[in-house]
Amino acid sequence: MMLQGKDGELRLADLGSGGTTYYLQVLFCEMDFTGPTSRPRIEDTLVMDRGLFDSNAHYISGDDSPRYAPLPFSFSARLADTISSRVLMDWTSGATRIPNLAGGSTIIYSWDGTTTIDGNTLPAFKDDKTTLRAQVLWDGTNDIGLQYNEVYFTPGQQTITESADGLVLSVNGMIYGDVTRIAAFDTTGATISFI
């Protein structure tokens, strides 16, 4: 069986509070998701004796910067005249509160400072950035899925494109947390609505 973009789904989730994590489901109608499959590794540098390779030659590890640097993340979604589209726009615009389906608003609880890379807990941001967890899963005989922790959607980096058949929201973010494989979606959250 061939995996196809039409079988893909993306979920954006906040950290939640009191055991309730909220998430949005985004179906891949535009099929242009782009994200890394893993984090880069630290580079090794070969140390030789005055440029000569001998039995004393060895590798040393470079600094940790490439391992912890933010990675690019993007997708697009076709917008509809629904609350779901408005919530997706709010979540990816840097908002700290979102309208909920019952009226009023709900605080978005950020993931920053709560996840690890190589067993090291990442620090919280100095300013008030809201990061989300993104999970993507392509359905097939053997599902392929990835989880992206601490994704920050920079305000001003999201765009809307108008065409004769609708509006498309193009979303760009940076992954500060780890990238891991998943076999299924996390089912502990409560869905906000469908996009």
Image: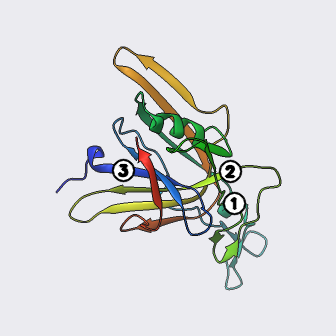
For badge 2, the amino acid type reads Thr
> Residue 81 has which mark?
none
Q: In percent of the image, x 38 and y 61: which residue is there?
A: 145
Asked where in the image residue 77 lies, by quadrant, the reply is top left
Residue nearer the viewer, 34 or 7:
7
Helix, strand or loop at disc 3?
strand
Q: In percent of the image, x 76 and y 65: which residue is there?
A: 123
Mark found first going from the N terminus, 3 or 2: 3
Q: State the residue position of label 1.
A: 112
- Structural crowding at the residue carrying mark 3, measured as other residues with C-alpha within 10 Å and reported as few (<14), some (14–19) or many (≥20): many
Q: State the residue position of label 3.
A: 9
Q: How far across and down, in percent of the image, does residue 121 sit?
A: 70, 72
Q: State the residue position of label 2.
A: 130
Mark 2 vs 1: CB contact within 8 A: yes
Residue nearer the viewer, 2 or 82:
82
The span from disc 3 to disc 1 (Cα, nearest Å) is 23 Å
For badge 1, the amino acid type reads Asp
- Structural crowding at the residue carrying mark 1, measured as other residues with C-alpha within 10 Å and reported as few (<14), some (14–19) or many (≥20): many
For badge 3, the amino acid type reads Glu
Residue nearer the viewer, 27 or 193:
193
Q: Is residue 87 above or below residue 135?
A: above
Q: In percent of the image, x 50 and y 32: which residue is there?
A: 170
Asked where in the image residue 6 lies, by quadrant, the reply is top left
Q: How far across and down, in percent of the image, does residue 119 sit?
A: 65, 78
- Farthest right residue in view: 126
Q: Is residue 160 above or below residue 188?
A: above
Side of 8 where 178 appears, left or right: right
Q: How far across and down, in percent of the image, does residue 147 sit?
A: 48, 61
Side of 142 where 34 appears, left or right: right
Mark found first going from the N terminus, 3 or 1: 3
